[in-house]
Image: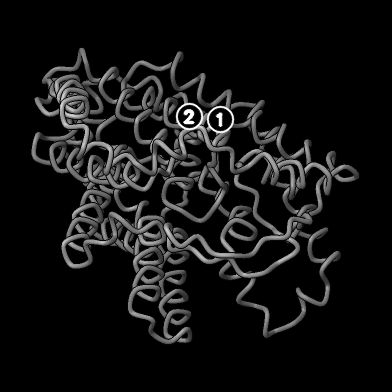
Amino acid sequence: MNNEIINAENILPIRNRRFIGVFVISLSMISVATFLQYKLSFSDLVYKIIWCICIVGFIFSSYFLMTDFKQPGRYFRVIYTIFILYQCFIIIKGIINNIELSLSLKNVWIFLGNYPVSWAFIVPLFIFFTKDIRIYFKILNWIIIMGILFLFLCIIFPDILTNRISAGYLGSLSFGCVYILILAKYFDKRRVNMAFIVALVGLVSLTYLARRSGMFSFIMFFLVAYIINFFSKPKHFILNLLPLLIFAIVVIYFNSPTYSSKFTARLERRLTEDTRSEVFEMFFLGMKDDMIFGKGMYGTYYCPISGEDEEEGVEWAEIDFREIIENGYLQLILSGGIVYLVLFVLILLPAALLGIFKSRNQFTRSCGIIILLWLIDMFLFGLPTLSLHYIFVWICVGICYNSNLRFLSENKIDVLLSS
């Protein structure tokens, strides 16, 4: 390490630091704006203007941060090229099948605002995100700031933690902090402790609201963060407390049945509740002739839905055809069929394996684990969408395919971060 020399060009440019801030803030503000519109009921036009400003900031910053177009490895280049070409086929097919919708100016918002349907095809381009390792840690620092914003909003609007819709809008602000827990080795105690608090608040909220898939995702990341940092030096006290925290929760739960039952009442009711089998049956019935190549962008399936859940505070508009299916893999099939699903897995799974098993540092191993956890999460929910979580997964894919990053020593990473 003493032989490492940090040259002037190794210092992260101020311009790049600004782009990082714009990148994270613009994505986070989409969720905040959506929540505020729901909570304060301001004009839909105002919301669309804010949303467009955020998107412009997101696109502008992404343009300057996506600079690595020389991805190594013949396998990746071939599979990824086929994947992108097939995405173009899906988009064209969707436009042709919905030509009136695509050409109508008054429906432009459907393309701009419909995250899973439209923006999911853009996110895989983040595999070309810059490979300057310092950028990623600057992003994670901004994620902590967004986590603090989440706590601040919870103080102003306490029902964020107890309202399903509010928690759904702002959950991404707390979930991002689990990345800091996995990479705790590279962060100081203050940041790790703050990330732990934010993530724990998010988990408690999802437990109270009985959001099973979200709970599972948080718990997976907590456990992985504990395991991967168990032998790290220095150890973070807050992560070492995790087993004791779990033990304390179990003891309190069984010794305070009155309060515990109130807190977990929804979860106990929904733990074995089957809310998706009927939807999945309708999906496969509607897809029987399109399983191979899908229905293209804007693809839908027949599944009438309407009504209101008074306890959850959710009201469903009356629709006959849905374009969202609550499962990441089925969402891929809806758009591009089994072909799209296979290409997707052929890119992400090898990246995860390379990161976990063919790496010399904890950073790229953690990136591989993040990809693997996303592939697991897609069985439960894990929708491809315009979110920092999904974008970060594709950034991790680019990292894991890059042998230069995988073979970096821990000492070299420490030198880069110190600059």
Give the total of numbered labels: 2
Identify residue for label 1: 72
Above or below residue 115? Residue 355 is above
Query: Residue 321 location in percent, x, y?
Result: 75, 62
Q: Nearer the viewer, residue 183 or 127?
A: 183
Q: In the picture, residue 188 is in which quadrant?
A: top left
Q: Is residue 259 left or right of residue 277?
A: left
Secondary element at image label 2 = loop
Q: Residue at x 39, y 76 (%)?
A: 37
Query: Residue 25 location in percent, x, y?
Result: 32, 62
Q: Is residue 166 visible?
A: yes
Q: Nearer the viewer, residue 64 or 138?
A: 138
Q: Nearer the viewer, residue 362 or 255?
A: 255
Secondary element at image label 1 = loop
Q: Residue at x 82, y 77 (%)?
A: 100
Q: Is residue 414 visible?
A: no
| 2 or 1: tag closer to the N-terminus | 1
Q: How much space separates mark 2 and mark 1, taking CA atoms?
A: 6 Å
